[in-house]
Amino acid sequence: AVIVHTGCLADMIADNPVPAIRRIERTNRSRVYWVGNVNDRRTYTAKLLRDRLSRVVPAGAPRDPLGVAILGGGTPAENGELQALLTQVGLSSQGIIIPEVGMEQVREVAGASIFIWARQSELMDVSALAFDDLPVTLVRAPSPVGIEGTIEWLRQAAEAAGPEHSLVD
């Protein structure tokens, strides 16, 4: 394992070492852990999610091509609305993960091929680490707030499923 330690200056200027971490992991085939003043929990959560998803559904296992997992859930009512909207546009809502990353939540979303952010989170900048080795599409759409924001969020989710699922304006 390689440990990358950044101090408070990197956190203050929003330096993102994810590209360097990817290079190190690719060239050295080592697991990299990013440790810093602010990001310890974020990086740990991203790595934990990747490890759990890999354990539940191996990389070669089939995934639902229309399956969508929502990252960054809200209240039960908000989550239910988003899941219903995904279904209305022909996608299959698999569940919500983050802030909860327990095995129950991981099993719910394990078959999804699309992971889309619903709420902006401090985990967004390191979320690529959670999905690097998995055959999934990570979508960093704007939060579904208001009519236009929600339509854009749904459009990006549908486009991730392929051009044939694109929403017409």
Image (tube, rainbow, N blue to C red):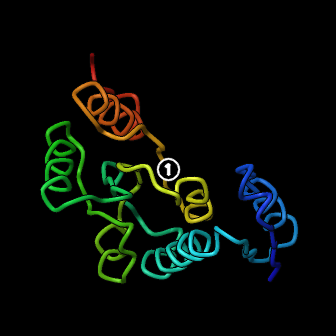
Q: In which quarter of the image is the C terminus?
A: top left
Residue at x 39% of width, y 34% of height: 156
**Can see residue 84?**
yes
User: In the visual, does 10 lie left or right of 84?
Assistant: right
Task: Check the image and name the residue furthest to the right.
Answer: 27
In terms of depth relative to the viewer, which is nearer, 44 or 94?
A: 44
| Three-letter code for the amino acid on which mark 1 is drawn | Leu
Residue at 17% in and 42% down: 85
Residue drawn at the location 53% of the way across and 78% of the way down: 48
Counting from the top left corner in percent of width and height, residue 165 is at: 31, 32
Query: Which residue, given by chain and number where applicable, does mark 1 sit on?
Result: 138
Residue 130: x and y in percent read 56, 65
> Dot 1 surroundings within 10 Å: few (below 14), some, or many (20 or more)?
many
**Residue projecting furthest to the top:** 169
Q: In this view, does 68 lie to the left or right of 131?
A: left
Judged left or right of residue 83, residue 130 is right
Q: Where residue 127 sits in the image (x, y, percent)? A: 55, 59
Say which quarter of the image contains residue 71.
bottom left
Badge 1 marks a residue whose secondary structure is strand
- Residue 100 occupies quadrant: bottom left
Decide if residue 165 is in sight here: no
- Residue 125's x, y, as percent? 59, 53
Give the residue drawn at x 41%, y 54%.
115
Quarter of the figure with the N terminus: bottom right
